[in-house]
Image (cartoon, grey):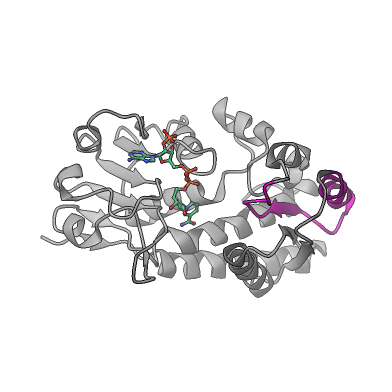
Amino acid sequence: MPARILDGKALAEKVRARITADVAVVKEEHGITPGLAAVLVGEDPASQVYVGMKHRATEAAGMLSRQVVLDADTSQEELEGLIAALNDDDAIDGILVQLPLPDHLDPRPVQELIDPAKDVDALNPYTAGRLAVGDPTFLSCTPYGVLEILDEAGVPTSGAHVVVVGRSNLVGRPLANMLSLKGRDATVTVAHSRTRDLAEVTRLGDVVVAAVGSAGLITAEHVRPGATVIDVGTNRADDGRLVGDVDFDGVAEVAGAITPVPGGVGPMTVTMLLQNTLEAARARRGLPRR
Ligand code: NAP
């Protein structure tokens, strides 16, 4: 039987409507307008698209969106000076630096400089460390979106074996840490480029999450019948189409549920950035988390 399609776009609309309503409440009751600053260095076309999407979504939710665009030859000192200024800017609750940076800039010290109270992209090692010790502050947006999709679909993580393919600091590693938190309680396997017999490993999964960046890597033979498959990958096919890491047509024949690309995880990433910005605005003023 073909798999159930998990519609990330529809879920994103639903969650954004809730966030928009919550923003209206913090404005009305507390006079707070949550603010997000997105820093873009250079003119990478894909980064311009991503920052533009985040800007529109932030404004649509009723928040303040500040885009800071710097020349491609901006120095490390100038970039770090900007982060320090945004840390001190009370109108800004969340700061994100769009990656990749131009080659002459080192992202690590920039991420480490972002005030943990404003680290809505969750890439500061302090934020990642809080998650790693089981006491998270902000959750990385893409893995956070993956959890929301699983929850919405009614796919339990407690006691489930989840195989995460990919171990990047952006997706795979934080997702594995989130899934193994107390309360989430998944049994997690992390696979990567040195994993021997990937298909044998992924077939153990009640849930398989692909976060690799390799079109069509996960085929029907990688998936146990009835498993849930979440496709984080975004790749350009030869004909220009956006495709995931999962061979959608083949895997949909064996999986119980599957996310499409586009329209799966992608829309949820921006949505969880909005959620984190709202949470940052509340927390910075001593309001409880929702
Ligand atoms: P990344 O930093 O390049 O990491 C890729 C991971 O995949 C690495 O851990 C790598 O292993 C592993 N890998 C590579 N080839 C493999 C193979 N043949 N078998 C098993 N594992 C393999 O990428 P990323 O930033 O995590 O992004 C992954 C994908 O998700 C990309 O397509 C990206 O565009 C997409 N993405 C989508 C969203 C969204 O919102 N939809 C957000 C972020 C990223 P090693 O560690 O051994 O090298």
Total label count?
Answer: 0
Q: Which residues are magenta?
A: 77-103
Q: Quadrant of residue 200?
A: top left
Residue 230 rendering spot, x and y as whole percentages: 34, 51
In which quadrant is the N terminus drawn? bottom left
Q: Is residue 22 left or right of residue 10?
A: right
Asked whether residue 21 is in view, the answer is: no
Residue 61 highlighted magenta (yes or no) = no
Asked whether residue 98 is in view, the answer is: yes
Q: Is residue 48 left or right of residue 235?
A: right
The residue closer to the viewer here, 104 or 47, is 104
Q: Quadrant of residue 24?
A: bottom right
Residue 82, compared with residue 160, is above or below; it is below
Q: Is residue 242 left or right of residue 92?
A: left
Ligand 1 quadrant in view = top left
The residue closer to the viewer here, 115 or 233, is 233
Residue 148 rendering spot, x and y as whole percentages: 44, 53
Q: Residue furthest left?
A: 1
The residue closer to the viewer here, 288 or 188, is 188
Residue 74 rendering spot, x and y as whole percentages: 81, 54
